[in-house]
């Protein structure tokens, strides 16, 4: 008996219902990719229960509201959104993930639904969609830009959400390359906090012990914009003009200017400047809205007074609002609002507001008009929001420090590539994903010893037919020897799925001076690693490339600080550079005394700095974020072999390219119990050999039978 639940609601399946499920953890044909479980197309009958569960979606004339806070089922069903799905076979859970409706078939009023389920990793990726890093909210970390917050960031407890101000030479912030202006420092966020927020915003939880390791907790992501920028969202001020202005003739204009009653919204960096009471200038693009309450009187009464509230940019009228005032008595006490909006097109545009009145009283006599502005409200709207260099003492809006146009899914993917992470679903809890590096994924011991007495590692098969957990003294494994169909062909592929001679592990190239200098000299990307399989039958190259760029470290003459230098041009003639994002390790590093300045003002004298680099520390590194050792360091330092390839990729690559490596593809008879207890972290034991389970293809959940299984022979079990 098979049962399908969508959002905890049971749906009907027919007697012909067939569900072919594929379970996978890795994709050996794409060594830098990871797979999720999924099903082939399943057909659901259009029963009353299913029609209701799917919101009567077959009816093209109906429409239903959608609430993201409510379960995606019944009248709230949205085919564009994920819905939790669980499949049971004989009351045993054999699949947990997400249901997707693919198609509705109406055959003369007979309704059928074509759908599929895919694992929660696939649901997670689908949820991220086109979301970018800037869609995340880190506003809780907003702070004042001053030396206290810059220096205190170097004392950050790495297990708490915080920001870090790394010392990076972005050009034009030091006259001697020893003392540095505070504009040198730009806030960066930690990788672990990006990951946690991405998962939480997508509605998923994660278990990832690696996030709490010393190596990972110190990772930050930096942006390389030309300036350290923040956003002013809205600035406004209000004023009451109580002076009466007498107009003695027709067609008269008056300038509404600043008065003592006007209160200003303080702007850092002097982005708004009054121009002698006749308007104001700006040094950025803005939108302006002005609202007035007006009142007036006329002696003697006149008809058909035309009023215009006009906004000028220099001498050019850019916007106006007109109104007719019909004075049929000596005084006019009503109030009303007028508004005008304009957008600056050039920095330094001067804006002013004028009120223009014309009237016709049927004769040539000028009437005296008293015009009073009861209240004026000016609102400066930055729409779209403009970026402006951070000013000392100003507010740092952390959301504006996030690198732009980086997809969240690409960010997660690059972190997974950097650490060779396996991301997989928790077998029991909904929307819980687990993250483990490949080197820590497989269970290498601790299970019960069920060996024969000579301790050869060969399991004494019992008669129960259960897949017993065995232990050969080193590793845990599940015995599938008796489940193998030996009457069907067994496909054995030597050297696993090697189809290339070279495997390149690399950062994304960038064109700053030091990256250019390294690539010009050595014809390779800084920090890259080429793995040669020595496979004679191919010259192809497979690439594992990150979205991050490499970051060479430099040290200037007469100074002991080591730092990234990200700029164009040779040292001494460098210019700021709009480069790619970087991932770095940070620490508080001691150094000789230096001065932190704000212009010519010394803010502090310090004997440490906020180091950031691919090494965990510049003088005696014990870990390196690069994939391989560089041909040259741009400072008198030493390297380390504890790089990303050696720590996280070498074992994997050695195993899939070893001369004794074998990829076994065979047919196994697996039942619902095998599937419900499926654990890719446990080795598979077959006839005295250990294998890593890579994929189970087209397991029939409705009628469990033989299915195709992909196994990789274990070469070594030592970390």
Image (cartoon, rainbow, N blue to C red):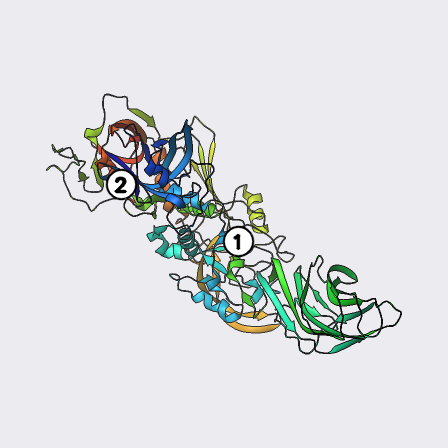
Q: Is 434 placed left or right of 276 in the picture?
A: left
Among the 4 quarters of the image, the one containing residue 383: bottom right
Mark 1 — residue?
403
User: Looking at the image, is mark 2 or mark 1 earlier in the sequence?
Assistant: 1
Residue 155 spot, x, y in % from top left: 43, 67
Q: Quadrant of the N terminus?
A: top left
Mark 2 — residue?
679
Q: Is 402 placed left or right of 338 in the picture?
A: left
Secondary element type, mark 1: loop
Within 10 Å of the Cα at label 1, are there few (<14), some (14-19), or many (20+) other Cα atoms? Answer: some
- Give the residue furthest to the front: 328
Q: Nearer the viewer, residue 542 or 404?
A: 404
Asked if residue 462 is positioned above or below residue 622 in the image, the reply reads: above
Among the 4 quarters of the image, the one containing residue 297: bottom right
Q: Nearer the viewer, residue 519 or 380?
A: 380
- Give the residue furthest to the left: 453
Q: Residue at x 38, y 33 (%)?
A: 113
Within 10 Å of the Cα at label 2, are there few (<14), some (14-19), or many (20+) other Cα atoms? Answer: some
Residue 138 spot, x, y in % from top left: 47, 59
Among the 4 quarters of the image, the one containing residue 20: top left
Q: Quadrant of the C terminus?
A: top left
Asked if residue 403 is positioned above or below residue 607 in the image, the reply reads: above
Q: Say how many tags the image has.
A: 2
Residue 315 spot, x, y in % from top left: 79, 62
Secondary element type, mark 2: loop
Q: Nearer the viewer, residue 323 or 525?
A: 323
- Residue 563 makes an appearance in the image: yes
**Separation of disc 2 and disc 1 at Cα?**
37 Å
Q: Residue at x 37, y 35 (%)?
A: 116
- Residue 179 makes an appearance in the image: no
- Give the residue furthest to the right: 364
């Amino acid at each position: 008996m098979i049962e399908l639940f969508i959002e905890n609601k049971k749906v009907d399946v027919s007697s012909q219902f067939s569900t072919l499920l594929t379970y996978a953890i890795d994709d050996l044909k794409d060594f830098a990719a990871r797979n999720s479980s999924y099903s082939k197309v399943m057909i659901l009958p259009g029963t009353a229960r299913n029609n209701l569960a799917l919101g009567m979606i077959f009816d093209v004339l109906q429409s239903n509201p959608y609430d993201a806070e409510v379960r995606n089922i019944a009248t709230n069903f949205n085919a564009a959104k994920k819905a939790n799905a669980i499949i049971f076979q004989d009351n045993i859970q054999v699949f947990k993930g997400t249901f997707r409706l693919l198609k509705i078939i109406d055959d003369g009023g007979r309704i059928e639904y074509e759908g599929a389920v895919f694992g929660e990793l696939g649901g997670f990726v689908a949820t991220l969609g086109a979301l970018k890093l800037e869609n995340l909210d880190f506003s809780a970390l907003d702070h004042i830009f001053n030396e206290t917050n810059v220096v205190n960031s170097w004392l950050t407890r790495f297990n708490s959400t915080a920001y870090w101000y790394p010392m990076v030479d972005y050009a034009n912030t030091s006259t001697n390359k020893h003392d540095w202006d505070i504009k040198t420092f730009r806030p960066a966020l930690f990788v672990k906090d990006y990951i946690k927020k991405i998962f939480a915003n997508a509605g998923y939880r994660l278990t990832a012990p690696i996030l709490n390791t010393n190596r990972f907790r110190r990772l930050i992501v930096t942006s390389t914009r030309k300036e350290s920028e923040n956003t002013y969202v809205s600035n406004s001020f209000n004023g009451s003009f109580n002076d009466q202005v007498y107009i003695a003739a027709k067609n008269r204009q008056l300038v509404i200017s600043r008065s003592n009653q006007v209160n200003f919204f303080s702007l850092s960096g002097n982005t708004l400047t009054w121009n002698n009471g006749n308007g104001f200038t700006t040094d950025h693009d803005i939108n302006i809205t002005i609202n007035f309450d007006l009142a007036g009187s006329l002696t003697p009464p006149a008809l058909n007074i035309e009023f215009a509230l006009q906004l000028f940019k220099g001498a050019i009228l850019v916007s106006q609002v007109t109104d007719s005032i019909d004075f049929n008595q000596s005084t006019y006490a009503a109030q009303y609002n007028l508004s005008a909006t304009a957008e600056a097109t050039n920095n330094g545009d001067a804006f002013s507001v004028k009120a223009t009145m014309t009237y016709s009283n049927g004769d040539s006599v000028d009437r005296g008009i008293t015009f009073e502005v009861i209240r004026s409200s000016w609102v400066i709207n930055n729409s779209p929001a403009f970026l402006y260099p951070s000013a000392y003492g100003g507010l740092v809006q952390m959301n504006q420090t996030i690198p732009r146009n980086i997809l969240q899914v690409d960010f997660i993917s690059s972190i997974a590539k950097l650490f060779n992470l396996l991301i997989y679903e928790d077998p029991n809890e909904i929307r819980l994903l687990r993250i483990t590096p490949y080197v820590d994924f497989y269970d290498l011991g601790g299970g019960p010893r069920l060996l024969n007495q000579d301790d050869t590692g060969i399991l004494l098969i019992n008669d129960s037919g259960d897949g017993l957990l065995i232990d050969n003294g080193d590793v845990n494994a599940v015995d599938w020897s008796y489940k193998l169909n030996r009457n069907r062909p067994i496909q054995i592929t030597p050297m696993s799925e090697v189809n290339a001679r070279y495997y390149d592990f690399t950062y994304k190239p960038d064109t700053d001076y030091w990256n250019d200098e390294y690539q010009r000299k050595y014809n390779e990307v800084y920090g890259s690693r080429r793995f040669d399989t020595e496979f004679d039958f191919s010259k192809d190259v497979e690439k594992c490339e990150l979205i991050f760029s490499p970051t060479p470290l430099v040290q200037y003459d007469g100074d002991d600080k080591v730092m990234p230098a990200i700029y164009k041009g040779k040292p001494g003639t460098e210019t700021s550079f709009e480069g790619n994002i970087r991932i770095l390790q940070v620490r508080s590093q001691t150094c000789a005394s230096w001065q932190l300045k704000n212009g010519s003002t010394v803010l502090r004298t310090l004997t440490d700095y906020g180091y950031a680099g691919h090494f965990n520390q510049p003088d005696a590194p014990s870990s390196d974020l690069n994939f391989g050792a560089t041909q040259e360091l741009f400072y008198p330092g030493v390297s380390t072999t504890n790089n990303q390839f050696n720590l996280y990729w070498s074992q994997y690559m050695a195993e899939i390219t070893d001369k004794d490596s074998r990829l076994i593809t065979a047919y196994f008879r697996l039942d619902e119990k095998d599937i419900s207890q499926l654990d890719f972290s446990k080795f598979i034991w077959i006839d005295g050999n250990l294998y890593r389970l890579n994929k189970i293809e087209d397991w029939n959940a409705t009628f469990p039978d033989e299915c195709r299984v992909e196994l990789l022979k274990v070469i070594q079990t030592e970390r």
